[in-house]
Amino acid sequence: MGAQQRRQPLLERHRYVSNYLTTSPHRTMLRQSTLGCRRSSTAYHLLYTFVAGLAALASVDSAAQQNLFNIPSGDLTRAGKMFYQHQLNLYTTAVESKGHFVYGLGKDWEIGANLVGKGMYFSSDWRLLHNDDPDHGALYPFLMLTAQKRFVISDDIDVNLGVQGGYNLSDRLANKKFAFFNYGLGVFHLADRSSRIVVGGYHTDDEFVGDGNEVGVMLGYEVKITRGLYLMGDWMSGDNDAAVAVLGGMYNLSKRIQICAGVMIPNPDTPKPMGLVLELNYLGWDLD
């Protein structure tokens, strides 16, 4: 099939779609108008909000959490401990589920597994999210193994390298495809290592993110507002299925449980709708 059909987003690569979708001669797109905004104005608002969050880092005392929304925070799981994050992406017609399990090996190494792309439509007909045909865009769901290594450059700068790789879950062996997502991050700690800016790049493939760019930039930040309450945000560049920003916050319910919430804002030309992101983090150790 042509490239235009291949760019259908995760929530829209089915032959039968709900009445909430808008059809064009080339592809079916779920428009952001469902949340009452246009991409052009959203891009400027996103840039302003993101920069404002970065500026706040210079004057706000904070402490880091384990993960940001869609990119690593640069923290590693402690040796012999585990970390689990469950994320729900809520759209007007569907919910997407992601699970991330990580185990700390020590010596600045961690390994884990991700199960991403599960979910279901709840309007107008109930059905599971599933795609094992590369001609219809990014495949899902995926089970991927992960590994990350941190290099301490100085008291305030770390460099992290990570790899993720695995296969989509299909009941047909011929439709199973290997996909990867590799990244490098520079983590810049501020305010006595209680705040941070994360800057890096990623390399992936179209099996994992669909049509669009396969190399891009990642940015993130984290800011403490009060004890246990944080602002955070992250952004991935490009026009593939993962190229979005999420702006929100996190709250420590206890020494081991965190909840996070944010607004997902797609980049211009990204084939994905706006949505809400909810996360639950469980740490296998007590927060300081």
Image (tube, rainbow, N blue to C red):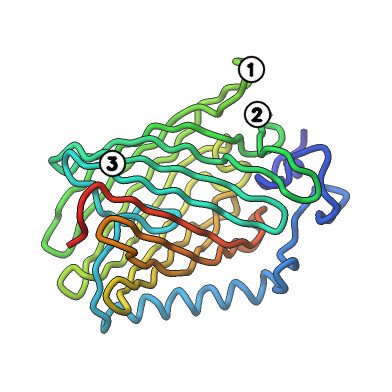
Instruction: Identify the residue at image location x=63%, y=50%.
Output: 95
Q: Residues within 10 Å of mark 2 (few under 14, many from 20)?
A: many
Q: Residues within 10 Å of mark 1 (few under 14, many from 20)?
A: few
Instruction: Identify the residue at image location x=56%, y=27%.
Output: 169
User: Could you tell me which secondary element the residue under label 1 belongs to?
Assistant: loop
Residue that carries the numbered disc 2 in the rendered image: 132
- Which badge, 3 or 1, is on the more N-terminal residue? 3
Q: Spot the residue most to the top.
A: 173
Q: Quick check: marks 1 and 2 in contact, CB under 8 Å?
A: yes
Q: CA distance from mark 3 to mark 2?
A: 28 Å
Q: Quick check: marks 3 and 1 in contact, CB under 8 Å?
A: no
Residue that carries the numbered disc 3 in the rendered image: 148
User: Could you tell me which secondary element the residue under label 2 belongs to?
Assistant: loop
Residue 3, by quadrant, is: top right
Q: CA distance from mark 1 to mark 2?
A: 9 Å
Q: Can you tell which mark lies on residue 192?
A: none
